[in-house]
Amino acid sequence: RHDPQGSANFLEDESTKIFARKVADHYSARSNQTLEEREASPIIHLKKLNNWIKSVLIQLYARRGDAVLDLACGKVGGDLIKWDKAKIGYYVGIDIAEGSIKDCRTRYNGDADHHQRRKKFTFPARLICGDCYEVRLDKVLADDAPFDICSCQFALHYSWSTEARARQALANVSALLRPGGIFIGTMPDANVIVKKLREAEGLNFGNSVYWVRFDEEFSDKKFKSSSPFGIKYTFHLEDAVDCPEWIVPFHIFKSLAEEYDFELVFAKNSHEFVHEYMKKPEFVELMRRLGALGDGNQDNSTLSADEWEAAYLYMSFVLRKRGQPDKS
Ligand code: SAM
């Protein structure tokens, strides 16, 4: 364990695993909330807004009968209901957190408390516990591929701890999608985070619902000499997240994705995303149903200014795998 040669690779591998475990433990340990607890959350409207963004992405890109790969699918199957509404044909969800996959299975099987009265999902599903950024998924999912659409919501940045993991994440998605297949995701917007860090007096910034803290090693705030991978900060989002995360410089993400045969369809900060899709009546109606942006007439009916600022930390992207879909 204490390598006298001080092998940098060994140490790097070991610490990467420790951080991946930290992330997994954090998400595994989060308890399920009752509906009442959820509604009382200080970021309830931000959660609803993020659900709206994911629903819009799914409605824009999922087609009836699609085979879906949901990387880092999350605790309660994250988006199972959204995929069900899109009438998909097959679903594979993978998450590193054992607790989350267990909850996911419960939800899929329809025996979780809050879902007792819900009809069974119409599509078959496979739920797997694993590290999507470490393991070669083309081997694990050889019988399930190819997928029409892959989704990685609020999680791809956990792959940017090392170049090897960032590459494995993209290699996995690329290997599993059919030509012309779509990769949708939401992750922190590095431009916003770095801009806020530079405007901050010290190495941290935030408001009443979130804070971000960078380590001393990034005190120059320029990141010029550092590798674009492994730029770690600690993120705290009230009632949601408390763990290490990594910056994903978007221009580097885009060119790395191109190496894995992806072309960018669009990338939009959440604020821009809201402004653009709130011009469409069907998505305004969806927002109303989800209750993210109320009419503002009642206290607590809409996002607080601090939640809206936290929303600004995120962006959505859509990539398309090169090639023409098989006609057969
Ligand atoms: N996608 C879900 C959603 O939108 O509700 C969950 C998002 S949650 C913020 C981040 C998820 O990423 C957690 O469920 C966590 O366990 C998962 N995760 C983090 N690192 C992972 C990895 N290396 N492999 C698979 N899942 C991972």
Image (cartoon, grey):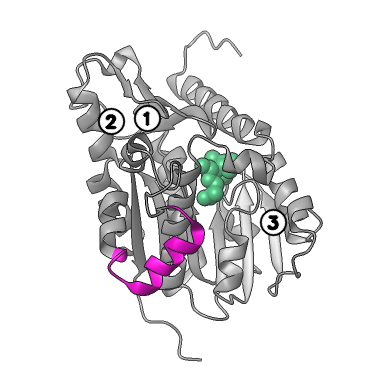
Q: Residue 151 vs residue 74: left or right?
A: left
Q: Are marks 1 and 2 in contact (CB under 8 Å)?
A: yes
First in residue order: circle 3 vs circle 2? 3
- Residue 285: in magenta span: yes
Q: Main SS type for the magenta part?
A: helix
Q: Does the residue tagged 1 have its C-beta within 8 Å of any atom of ligand 1?
A: no
**Pointer 2 residue:** 227
| Front residue of this view, candidates 278 and 247 | 278
Q: For ligand 1, which image quadrant applies? A: top right
- SS for dot 1: loop
**Pointer 1 residue:** 230
- SS for dot 2: loop
- What quarter of the picture does the N terminus occupy? top right
The disc placed on residue 45 is none
Q: Residue at x 66, y 42 (%)?
A: 36
Q: Is residue 197 above or below residue 180?
A: above
| Front residue of this view, candidates 110 and 125 | 110
Q: Amino acid at mark 1?
A: Gly
**Pointer 3 residue:** 127
- The magenta stretch is 277-292
Give me the C-alpha separation between circle 1 and circle 2: 7 Å
Give x and y (percent) for residue 298: 43, 46
Q: Nearer the viewer, mark 3 or mark 1?
A: 3
Q: Residue at x 45, y 71 (%)?
A: 59
Q: Nearer the viewer, mark 3 or mark 2?
A: 3
